[in-house]
Amino acid sequence: MKALTLALSLILVAGPALAGPVTLKTNPSDDDGRVTLGDVFDGAGSAADVAIATRTGPSIVFEAGQLQGLALRSGLQWSNPRGLRRVVVRQGGATPSASLDSAPAERSASRPGATVDVLTYARSLSAGDVVQPEDVVWTTVQAHQAQASGPQDAEQVIGLSARRALRAGSPVAARDLASPQVIARNDTVEVAFISGGVRLTVTGRATRNAAVGDPVPVLNLASGKTIEAVATGPGRAVTGPAAQSARSNSNSFARQGR
């Protein structure tokens, strides 16, 4: 009995390690806009009906790493032997028009009927939700519908938070997202001054909300003076020479929406 219990425990703990291998279909497609693992992979077995996205246009494009993560969650392992960057899933019956690992097409408003791949929300998000890799997908739209300020890489938006409720299928825009708040007004904040190997710290109280890379005035309770600092994380900020570097390291796409 003990041996059986131990064996079951090992199986549960090693779940992802026992993931079944699958192969990418030559021309992944779906018939109803509901994209499942079975639409994308051969050998998906019992996980074939697991939905991973909703296709709202003629096609939907997944980052390869994103697709690997979605498969692994359902116990499937795709090794991506061809080293693809992206995978296109098209409406059933559509003729493939681009290679699987192609980058988003160049915007070309001069060509009638031209299309472009834009990053869209795979699911609806509530205000404050943080964007995860599976929350965004590439979708093909008419070129005139694409926003010039849209992100060119999914990595630009992963980790940002929604400023307001966002609808599944809508294009990702800088105005939608912001760096997550890490300091709230009246939070206790440790401010560090770093220069030439010297590090000094003081504790104070934030006088405004701030995300990583945002300026945050911190009131030194001992002296009553306000320190102009830059937020670097929950309850942490820097001032002095390190402040400019901290501000430069904030998400550039999120800054476009301010």
Image: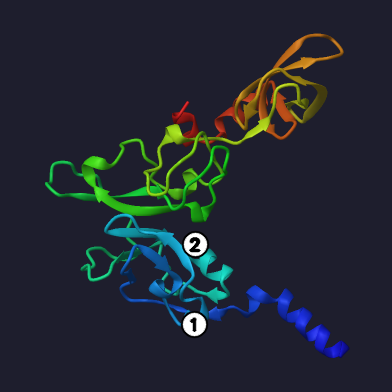
The amino acid type found where label 2 is placed reads Gly
Alpha-carbon span between mark 1 and mark 2: 21 Å
Q: The residue tagged with tag 2: helix, strand or loop?
A: helix
- Residue 52 visible to an observer of this rendering: yes
User: Going 50% across and 56% down the picture, which residue do you hit?
Assistant: 134
| Nearest the eye: 75 or 216 | 75
Q: Quadrant of residue 74?
A: bottom right
Q: Nearer the viewer, mark 1 or mark 2?
A: 1
Relative height, residue 132 to residue 249 (above, below): below
The amino acid type found where label 1 is placed reads Gly
- Residue 63 visible to an observer of this rendering: no
Q: How far from the left and from the top, in percent, is residue 212? A: 62, 32
User: Going 22% across and 45% down the picture, which residue do you hit?
Assistant: 143
Q: How far from the left and from the top, in percent, is residue 215? A: 62, 22
The quarter of the rendered structure image containing the N terminus is bottom right
Q: How far from the left and from the top, in percent, is residue 151? A: 40, 42
Q: Please report contact status of discs 1 and 2: CB closer than 8 Å, yes or no.
A: no
Residue at mark 1: 45
Q: Quadrant of residue 193?
A: top right
What colouring does the structure picture have?
A: rainbow
Q: The residue tagged with tag 1: helix, strand or loop?
A: helix
Disc 2 packing (10 Å; few <14; some 14–19; many ≥20): some
Q: How far from the left and from the top, in percent, is residue 196? A: 73, 27
| Nearest the eye: 79 or 193 | 79
Q: Is residue 97 left or right of residue 160?
A: left
Outermost residue on the front side: it is 32
Relative height, residue 110 to residue 93 (above, below): above
Quick one: label 1 or label 2, which is nearer the N terminus? 1
Disc 1 packing (10 Å; few <14; some 14–19; many ≥20): few
Relative height, residue 188 to residue 165 (above, below): above
Residue at mark 2: 65
Q: Is residue 42 left or right of residue 97?
A: right
